[in-house]
Image (cartoon, rainbow, N blue to C red):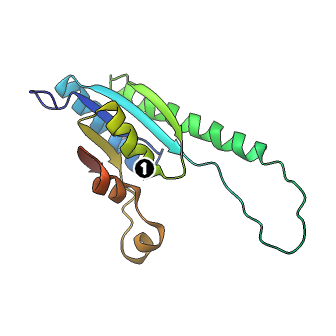
């Protein structure tokens, strides 16, 4: 962390309304502190398993994988544009990973960021228990401060 506050900020962007709010907050903080901004979107390619009896014909999953990558690129671009609308340009990174939490935490450490900014969908109770929460995981495992925007 710089003497004046945050020197490098990571925005974890998923395209949700809360992540758009997080993009505005990250941009405002980057402007206020003169910090550089890293914008990341993490996606997973759908995986499939077959446990039925007998052989299964080979299925071409490439169209599904291509679709997931295209959607992920579009989401990242939307995050970059949201920051640019606030007057801040950042380095955009697209990551494919099985664990979104792990990918964000590892990138934050690799980039030596001072702050991670991300949105929350505000899940509570049983729904949160079943689905889990990326923001909770990042807060629990990050090496730096985390700002979760609602």
The percent position of residue 136, horizontal first and vertical second, equals 33, 59
Give the residue number, with chain letter if any, for mark 1: 102
> Residue 71, how many percent across, how many down?
61, 40
Q: Residue at x 21, y 27 (%)?
A: 7
Q: Residue furthest bottom?
A: 126
Could you say where residue 29 lies in the image, as x and y percent from the top left?
22, 33
Closer to the camera in the image, 13 or 145: 145
Q: Secondary structure at mark 1?
A: helix
**In the image, residue 56 above or below residue 25:** below
x 87%, y 54%: residue: 58
Considering only vertical position in the picture, is 21 above or below 50? above
Q: Report the residue at 34% width, 31% height from top.
A: 111
User: Where 36 sits versus 46, above or below?
Assistant: above
x then y, percent, for residue 56: 88, 63
Q: In the figure, is residue 65 to the left or right of 149?
A: right
Determine if residue 82 is in view: yes
Is residue 23 in sight in this rendering? no
Residue that protrudes farthest toward the left in the picture = 3
Point out the image quarter for the N terminus: top left
Mark 1 crowd level (few <14, some 14–19, many ≥20, 10 Å Cα): some
- In the picture, measured across the screen, residue 149 lies left or right of residue 43, that is left
């Amino acid at each position: 962390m710089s003497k004046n506050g945050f020197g490098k900020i990571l925005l974890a962007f998923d395209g949700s309304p809360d992540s758009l709010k997080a993009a505005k907050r990250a941009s405002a903080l980057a402007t206020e502190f003169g910090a550089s901004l890293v914008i990341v979107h993490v996606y997973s390619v759908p995986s499939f398993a077959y446990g039925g009896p007998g052989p299964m014909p080979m299925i071409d999953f490439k169209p599904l994988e291509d679709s997931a990558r295209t959607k992920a690129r579009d989401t990242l671009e939307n995050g970059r544009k949201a920051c640019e609308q606030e007057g801040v340009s950042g380095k955009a990174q697209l990551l494919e990973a099985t664990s979104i939490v792990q990918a964000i935490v590892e990138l934050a450490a690799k980039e030596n960021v001072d702050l991670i900014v991300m949105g929350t969908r505000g899940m509570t109770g049983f729904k949160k228990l079943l689905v889990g929460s990326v923001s909770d995981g990042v807060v629990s495992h990050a090496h730096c401060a985390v700002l979760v925007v609602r």
